[in-house]
């Protein structure tokens, strides 16, 4: 078992766990050998019941599409697989096959899920993979220096209070205290007692690994045999860059920060790397310790700042949208849980829905709220009052965090959009059966919903009704006509069609005459194909073969959507940098020649797709 412990201590995310937890984990690990070429998981087969950690050897991930098998990834020693299927409880999305003779550690599902619940950092490691991995958004980043390293003070990285222990604390007790506080370092209070200063000792998780586990030290030994004293400290107002230099020069991974001679916090190497990588999926960890409105507002401001950093790094707009959705979802869940704590447990199952761009994972800069609430039928009499109070608290807190109320009142505070399941089902049926302009407007909002919190299964409640649209040529025809209401602003001669009058002269609205047109087309193709996806790019790709779209047109629209979104976001950040309110209308004359050429190509793809829809649905004949 000692071999398993040593191995886990060397590989993330297990290396982030407390020592005692790793010891318990090692006792539950199963060991299995797979010969070369042996399938471990099978695409479309039974869901994984273990997290597989490769101890020795390597495996290939093989995905089959249209009868063609491709090796999409190869994993080696210390890497894990099977967690997507394990977390979702669904069939594996690919076959995992031993590339060579391979030895794996198998962690049972119950143990893995318990670790995810108990340790947010452990859960976040795997959440990054499920959420399209932010690394995908950063793979195109430019090799540029991170200005945050030269502008941010070390004090700004402090996220936890200092945890202290007495010098007579045993190694075992110290490890437990670190586990319970979920910290990677503690200070040892040395004489003169009660004053945490540069004379204090420090013990880190690395010390426990290297000086206790590796050396076989008695767990009942006093912590003074393990600590480093005096601790290497830095002034809290030092720059992050200076802190990194100190760590590299002194060979340490934790820095206690001092102010007025006293220690006020501890930062570690990981804190600084997170600052450099600008990873929004790491931001939700800070919500655990958000106790005030100021903390929550600072969090949302940080998410907005991160969008700009990712944009500068060369990330794709679609991946930025998913990263922002993950960060905003974490905030929303935090707010709802606080409201539930005030009101008590909900009287029945319910789900909080986000709509529109947030429902499609496509929001980048903060916009007004679009949300709704659905709760179980046959709810107790007090359910409506409870959910009204819940909605009031959540929406108001979102306002305080910088998300304005919806001008059209599409929010859970509106009783019309806070209803039992049967009412929502009736809404959806009516919109499909009587597709007038108002109904089509509502479908554009509510068919793009996504549940963020709650136990009510909206997939089973609402998606089957939405799938019925593929059987209604009347509905699809009306939806197609609505999708062509705005035409791509480019003419037969490949010239941009700009506004010619008033304040709009020389402008193109990249939302309403750009990305929104693709969103509408993607929704049409997805409903035509009976695909439940809400994300625009996913809709396009999944419906390519089973709708009137076609694969070539789908990829052209995907590229156009990415490009138009990128141009729009770049323009908005130019406006922000000049102190202007960001908008969607771009002054074409101020675009670079390359941007103008790319804009034309993107709009040509949209125009071609719109022409195809007009022909397929004969929209000119629809009254």
Image (cartoon, grey):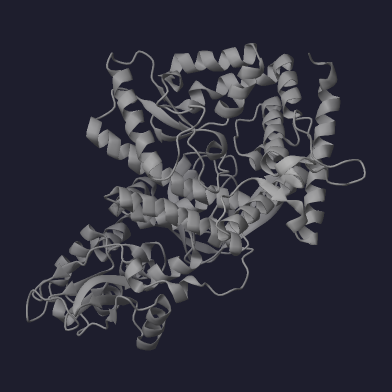
Name the image quarter holding the N terminus.
bottom left
Judge left or right: residue 51 versus residue 546: left
Write the residue at 40% across / 40% down: 399
Viewer-closest of 95 and 303:
303
| View extreme (bottom): residue | 249
> Residue 25: x, y in percent?
31, 58
Q: Residue at x 46, y 14 (%)?
A: 423
Residue 100, position in %: x, y?
A: 59, 64
Decide if residue 198 is in sight here: yes
Q: Can you say whether 130 is above or below 215 in the image?
A: above
Residue 227 placement: quadrant: bottom left
**269 vs 528: above or below:** below
- Say which residue appears at 73% left-offset and 28% top-offset: 483
Q: Residue furthest right?
A: 493
558, above or below 424, in the image: below
How many marks on residues?
Answer: 0
Q: Is residue 16 left or right of residue 164?
A: right
Q: Residue furthest front?
A: 502
As rendered, which of 92 and 136 lies closer to the eye?
136
Q: Quadrant of the C terminus?
A: top right
Q: Position of residue 174 (x, y in %)?
A: 17, 68
């Amino acid at each position: 078992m000692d071999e398993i412990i040593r191995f886990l201590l060397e590989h993330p995310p297990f290396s982030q766990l407390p020592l005692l937890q790793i010891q318990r984990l090692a006792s539950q690990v199963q060991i299995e050998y797979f010969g070369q070429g042996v399938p471990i998981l099978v695409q479309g087969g039974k869901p994984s019941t273990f997290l597989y950690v490769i101890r020795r050897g390597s495996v290939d991930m093989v995905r089959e599409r249209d009868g063609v098998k491709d090796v999409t990834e190869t994993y080696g020693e210390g890497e894990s697989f099977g967690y997507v299927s394990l977390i979702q409880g669904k069939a594996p999305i690919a076959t995992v096959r031993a590339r060579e003779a391979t030895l794996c550690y198998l962690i049972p599902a119950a143990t893995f899920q318990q670790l995810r619940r108990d340790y947010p950092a452990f859960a976040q490691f795997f959440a990054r993979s499920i959420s399209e991995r932010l690394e995908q958004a950063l793979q195109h980043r430019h090799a540029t220096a991170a200005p945050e390293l030269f502008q941010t003070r070390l004090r700004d990285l402090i996220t936890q209070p200092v945890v202290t222990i007495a010098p007579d604390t045993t190694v075992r007790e110290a490890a437990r205290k670190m586990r319970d506080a979920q910290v990677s370092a503690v200070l040892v209070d040395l004489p003169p007692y009660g004053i945490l200063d540069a004379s204090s000792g420090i013990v880190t998780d690395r010390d426990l690994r290297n000086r206790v586990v590796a050396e076989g030290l008695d767990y009942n030994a006093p912590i003074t045999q393990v600590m480093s004293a005096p601790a290497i400290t830095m002034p809290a107002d030092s720059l992050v860059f200076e802190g990194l230099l100190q760590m590299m020069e002194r060979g340490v991974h934790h820095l206690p920060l001092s102010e007025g001679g006293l220690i006020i916090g501890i930062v570690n190497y990981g804190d600084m790397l997170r600052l450099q990588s600008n990873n929004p999926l790491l931001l939700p960890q800070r919500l655990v310790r958000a106790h005030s409105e100021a903390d929550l507002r600072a969090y949302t401001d940080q998410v907005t700042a991160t969008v700009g950093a990712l944009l500068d790094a060369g990330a794709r707009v679609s991946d930025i949208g998913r990263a922002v959705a993950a960060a905003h979802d974490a905030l929303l869940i935090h707010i709802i849980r606080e409201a539930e704590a005030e009101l008590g447990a909900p009287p029945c199952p319910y789900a909080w829905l986000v709509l529109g761009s947030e429902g499609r994972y496509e929001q980048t800069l903060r916009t007004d709220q679009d949300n709704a609430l659905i709760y179980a039928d046959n709810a107790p009499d007090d359910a409506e009052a409870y959910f009204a109070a819940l909605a009031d608290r959540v929406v108001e807190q979102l306002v305080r965090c910088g998300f304005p109320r919806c001008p059209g009142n599409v929010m859970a505070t509106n009783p019309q959009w806070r209803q039992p399941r049967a009412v929502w089902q009736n809404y959806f049926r009516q919109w499909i059966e009587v597709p007038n302009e108002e109904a089509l407007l509502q479908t554009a909002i509510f068919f793009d919903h996504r549940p963020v919190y709650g136990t009510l299964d909206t997939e089973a409640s609402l998606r089957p009704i939405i799938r019925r649209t593929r059987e209604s040529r009347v509905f699809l025809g009306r939806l197609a006509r609505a999708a062509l209401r705005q035409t791509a602003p480019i003419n037969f001669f490949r010239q941009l069609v700009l506004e010619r009058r008033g304040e709009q002269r020389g402008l193109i609205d990249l939302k309403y005459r750009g990305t929104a047109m693709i969103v509408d087309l993607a929704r049409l193709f997805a409903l035509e194909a009976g695909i439940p996806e809400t994300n625009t790019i996913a809709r396009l790709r999944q419906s390519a073969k089973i709708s009137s779209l076609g694969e070539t047109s789908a990829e052209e629209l995907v590229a156009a959507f990415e490009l138009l979104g990128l141009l729009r976001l770049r323009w908005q950040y130019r406006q922000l940098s000049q102190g202007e309110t960001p908008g969607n209308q771009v002054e074409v004359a101020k675009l670079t020649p390359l941007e103008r050429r790319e804009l034309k190509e993107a709009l040509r793809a949209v125009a071609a797709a719109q022409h195809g829809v007009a022909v397929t649905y004969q929209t000119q004949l629809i009254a």
